[in-house]
Amino acid sequence: MPLITAPYVAPEEPEIPPPVDVPEIGYASITYIDPTGTRWPMTDLAADWYTLAQGVSGLGAASYTLTSDAHPRGGARLRHVQPQPRNIVWPLLVKGADHMEFTKNWRALARAFTRTITEQRPGRLEVARPDGSVRWIYVYYQDGWDGLGQIATGITWDSAVLTLWCEDPYWVDAVPQVVHREQGTGVDFLQPYPSVSSGQILGASTVHNAGDVVVWPEWRISGPASLITFTATRTRFVDGEAVVVTESFALDPSADDIGHGNLLAGEQVIVRTDPPQVRYEDGTNWFAALNWPAAVLWGLEPGDNEVVFQLDGSGSGSAVDLTFRPRYETA
């Protein structure tokens, strides 16, 4: 059966100020996006607020806590690695043409950051490179919006040193990666003339994760299908030995606690892996459709991932859309 792929159409790009030299990451344009979606340029030196280069920190690789077990012959053996939340220190200068203009800017920026706490929704710190690539990280205001408290400050200018807390320490690619696999209409080998379909079908695929760490994708399944199974095969190292590991999960729309019956043409189910969630197209909870307790909602490891998309009872229009954003150690 032929493979049909759909191109990804990127959204319109917002205006980005020219790059400047930022400590730890080099030349970049930084923008803060508050929980309402309002964009606040952080490196536009012509604006009434901008980042002070001296003192910026926390933009490099994540920090980790290592758990180990003592080894009887000396030393220790690593048992577990846990990435830790990230703290970003962000010095910011705010100014205005007069006192009231400065006060207006100071209050607006304070609100833009602190509303991540009052509304319990993160903002985003976005890093754009000269080549057009963009990475961001989700941030919450922690403290620091105080001002210097020195003579002459607080009239037409002042600066604050913010601490931004990141529950996920990794930077995220602004452009989602979409892998589309769809079952096409088969062709008769002899009609109207000898022909063959593509050898790549809705089945085995290689999915590349260009990031530095595991990503947790979203799956959108379109019917018809009677049983959906997604399987990943990868190599792990256990005590220095290479071990082939297979992880999979299956979704049955006819499961007792669901009772929907086969997924019909045009119907869709969305499976999210972080946090785990299964929703039918009308929002109904289909978590019970998974083959618990054997189900493993696996992630995509860095590099190539050998996966199989298996749709039993498939037909014309059966499709899988796998969406993820690569995650990185640094900006």
Image (cartoon, rainbow, N blue to C red):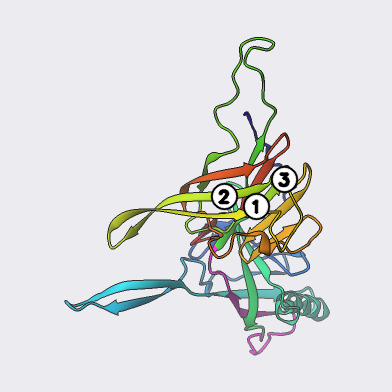
Residue position for label 3:
222
Identify the mark at residue 219; answer none if there is no mark. 1
Q: Is residue 312 magenta?
A: no
Q: Is residue 153 magenta?
A: yes
Q: Determine whether, in the image, residue 264 is placed left or right of residue 165.
A: right
Whole-percent x, y for residue 281 in the image:
78, 55
**Inter-mark Cα distance, 2 to 1:** 10 Å
* 10 Å crowding of disc 2: few (<14), some (14-19), many (20+): many
Say which residue appears at 58% left-offset and 52% top-offset: 129
Q: Quadrant of residue 153?
A: bottom right
Q: Quadrant of residue 316?
A: top right
Q: Which numbered disc, 2 or 1, marks the residue that appears first in the sequence?
A: 1
Whole-percent x, y for residue 253 in the image:
70, 54
Q: Nearer the viewer, residue 271 or 85?
A: 271
Segment tinted magenta in the rendering? 146-170
Badge 2 element: strand
Amino acid bearing label 2: Phe
Name above or below for residue 140 compared with residue 197: below
Say which residue appears at 73% left-offset and 42% top-offset: 224
Whole-percent x, y for residue 218 in the image:
64, 55
Q: Quadrant of the N terminus?
A: top right
Q: Are marks 2 and 1 in contact (CB under 8 Å)?
A: yes
Say which residue appears at 74% left-offset and 47% top-offset: 263
Amino acid bearing label 3: Ser
Residue position for label 2:
230
Can I make out residue 152 in this image? yes
Q: Nearer the viewer, residue 148 or 303?
A: 303
> Which residue in the rendered view is the most extreme toward the left?
73
Amino acid bearing label 1: Trp
Say which residue appears at 68% left-offset and 72% top-offset: 122
Q: Quadrant of residue 282?
A: bottom right
